[in-house]
Image (spheres, rainbow, N blue to C red):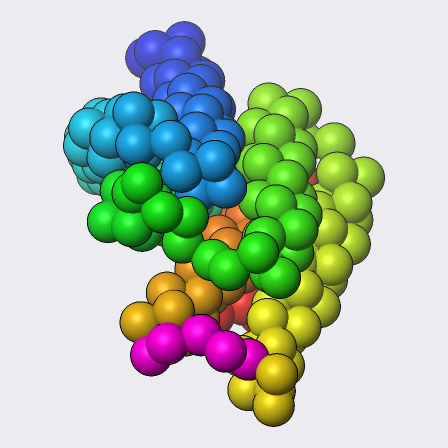
Amino acid sequence: MREVFQQELREVQDRLVEISELVTVAITNATAAFNESNVTLAEKVIAEDPKIDALASSLDELAINILALQQPVARDLRIVVTALRVSASLERMGDIAEHIAQLARYRYPDKVVKKSLRQTFAEMGRLDVEIAKKLTVLLKTEDLALADEMRNDDDAIDELHVSVFDAVLGAHWKGEAVDTVDVTLASRYHERFADHAVSIAKKVQYLATGEWVGSSNP
């Protein structure tokens, strides 16, 4: 029974990595679709999001069954509880990637943002992709140095997010109401994607050390 239990725990961790890899693909394609006005990529992200949802739901069922049947303690319990919380955040990250792709599809063949902000959003997208890649490695390895890197990337995204709001509220903003709404939503999506990733990083730190490093409310 103990061997079966350890195999189930490994499966929980492997499934988290699998979902994170799909989320990385989703945000990579979503930000490319957004910045390039690529409707094919946008539709691909939208079509594949249900797979992320299904895998997250399946993982939750496995984790709940382990809790009910195996009654894990100590680190084993942390693995299962962390998996339940992380899967919810990963599923939400997939949804956010889908929202970014939907904006690209809605505005096709036009680009979502005006020329003055395109470089800002390109950088936000690049940082989101980097954070997603680092998150996958973190889930595989529990290399906590990556969590620090992710927080630094998140800080950079937060600064860009603030700059977007400064731009649309400034005297020189010439966008229509729909432009303002699109830009505000898009910036928020990029910022929240990173927030969820950092929240997961904190949970992995807890899993690795048994110590909670701070609260997060994504």
| Image quadrant assignment for residue 33 | top left
The N terminus lies in which quarter of the figure? top left
Residue 81 can be seen in this image: no
Most foreground residue, 108 or 122: 108
Most foreground residue, 48 or 103: 103
Q: Return the x and y of residue 75 as percentages of the image width and height.
A: 55, 38
Residue, x 57% and y 56% (percent of image)?
A: 115
Report the label total: 0
Residue 133 can be seen in this image: yes
Residue, x 19% and y 28% (percent of image)?
A: 47
52 displayed left or right of 35 = left
Residue, x 41% and y 48% (percent of image)?
A: 111
215 over 121 or under it: above or below = below
Residue, x 47% and y 58% (percent of image)?
A: 113
Q: Return the x and y of residue 166 as percentages of the image width and height.
A: 63, 81
47 displayed left or right of 93 = left
Q: Return the x and y of residue 95 as percentages of the image width and height.
A: 30, 46
Q: Is residue 161 magenta?
A: no
| Image quadrant assignment for residue 91 | top left
Most foreground residue, 75 or 79: 79
Q: Return the x and y of residue 209 as percentages of the image width and height.
A: 70, 45
207 over 13 or under it: above or below = below
The C terminus lies in which quarter of the figure? bottom left
Farthest-out residue, bottom:
171
Most foreground residue, 25 or 35: 35
Q: Magenta residues? A: 173-177
Magenta-drawn stretch, dominant element (helix, strand or loop): loop
